[in-house]
Image (cartoon, rainbow, N blue to C red):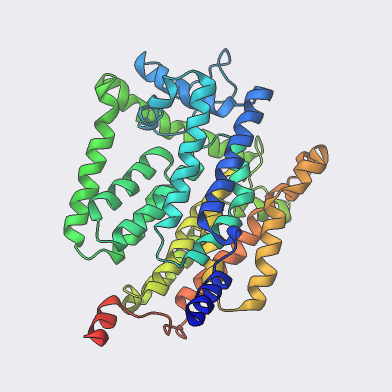
Amino acid sequence: MLNRFQTKTIDLSQRPKFYQDNRFVLFLWILITLIFVIDSWATHRYNNYLIFENTFRNLLHEKSLYALYPAYHDDANHYGPVFSVLIAPFAIMHNWVGLLFWNLFNCCLLFKAVQTLPLSKEEKVAIGYIAIPCLIESMLNQQFNAGAGALMILSYTLINKDKGIWAALCIVLGTFIKLYGIVGLVFFFFVKKKPVFILWLILWSVVLFLLPMLIASPDYVVHCYVDWKNSLVGKNMVNVLGGGIDISIMGFFRELFDEKKIPNSLFLILGAMLFMLPFINVSRFKKRRFQLMILPSVLIFPILFSTGAEDCTFIISIVGVGVWYVKESNQAMKKVLLPILLLITCNFPLLLFPVFAKSHPLSLAIISLPYFLVWLRVIYIATNNRFDYAEETEPDMVTALID
């Protein structure tokens, strides 16, 4: 009797605190989402959502998806034509209801994607907390970035579960909406049935290309893809030539050296070479720890090297930072890099001194620097020959030992 009582006491003492539970993290994420939805309602600050939901209306009436519509919203759409179909269920609702469910959809999709990672519960909780500053920015701006990040994560975890058909869908859908998803193609190296996976990629590309044609004419949809390309080129030119603030790593170095003429191509070539460097280690492709370093690289790289990156876009990269953090063995580096990154991510110059920040772009572009440092560390770990695989025990090996 006494032994049973002692066992129960020990179990209670070992029970994790409420804030160490993933359900509490989900509660915080949803609470943050609701707070900023209410803020958007109260201040009528939901321009981005108006841009998104208007794309469905424009698709129905075969109007340009990328023109300016000042009577409805500021700025213009820059997402792919298939996005106008994705937003349809939210666009048919009243704006205030659609906004609520749109933000909840993005919040919950990213949370669910994090839960699919091959990590411990404690590690997933840590990632959930690390992502909160960027989640706030993403929900405040009603962007699809959380959803885009979720698709990139799912493209890896579904491959990891040998569900190539759905992994291919995530890669293609992410690419057809925001282009960032195309980086997920590097997970192809981890696919077991590569020919079949290629067929799924082709099939989903055809399906998603044709999907808007269920609502609009083929000629109109094809023209929309041309317009999409032109809108992205135009936005890139505005960011590079000074019409906007470029917070990519290219923008940071251009502002740091006060040299606007440094070409993107120089950064992109060097960045692509570093990005692909770990893949020289073919023998490691099946190693879980190696894959879990490639994932943060995939989540950080496209944001760092995109002139279209915004502060709310870093919700994609922050999850990659979280994965790096929970797998990083260098405690000193963790204690230095993460606090600096989170501090800069909070964007205090813009919050506290908006006039100064906008007149000194370097104070805003510096947001990419700590992510760049984390990315370099990730590349180093993934490439370094001295890997610590002690934590890796293949499931079939465990089964063999038990048998």
Q: Position of residue 79 (x, y in %)?
A: 44, 34
Q: Quadrant of the C terminus?
A: bottom left
- Residue 340, how many percent across, how many down? 71, 62
Q: Residue at x 45, y 32 (%)?
A: 230
Total labels: the figure holds 0
- Residue 212 figure quarter: top left
Relative to 223, does residue 318 appear above or below in the rendering?
Answer: below
Please indicate, yes or no, whether residue 310 appears anywhere in the rendered image. no
In this rendering, is residue 61 above or below 372?
Answer: above
Q: Residue at x 38, y 50 (%)?
A: 182
The residue drawn where x is 40% and y is 16% is: 63
Nearer-the-camera pick, 144 or 326: 326
Q: Which quadrant of the figure has residue 190?
A: bottom left
Q: Position of residue 253 (x, y in %)?
A: 66, 56
**Residue 339 x/y as whole percent:** 70, 63
Q: In the image, is residue 16 above or below residue 89?
A: below
Q: Residue at x 71, y 55 (%)?
A: 344
Q: Is residue 367 visible?
A: yes
Residue 84 falls in image quadrant: top left
Judged left or right of residue 307, residue 89 is: left
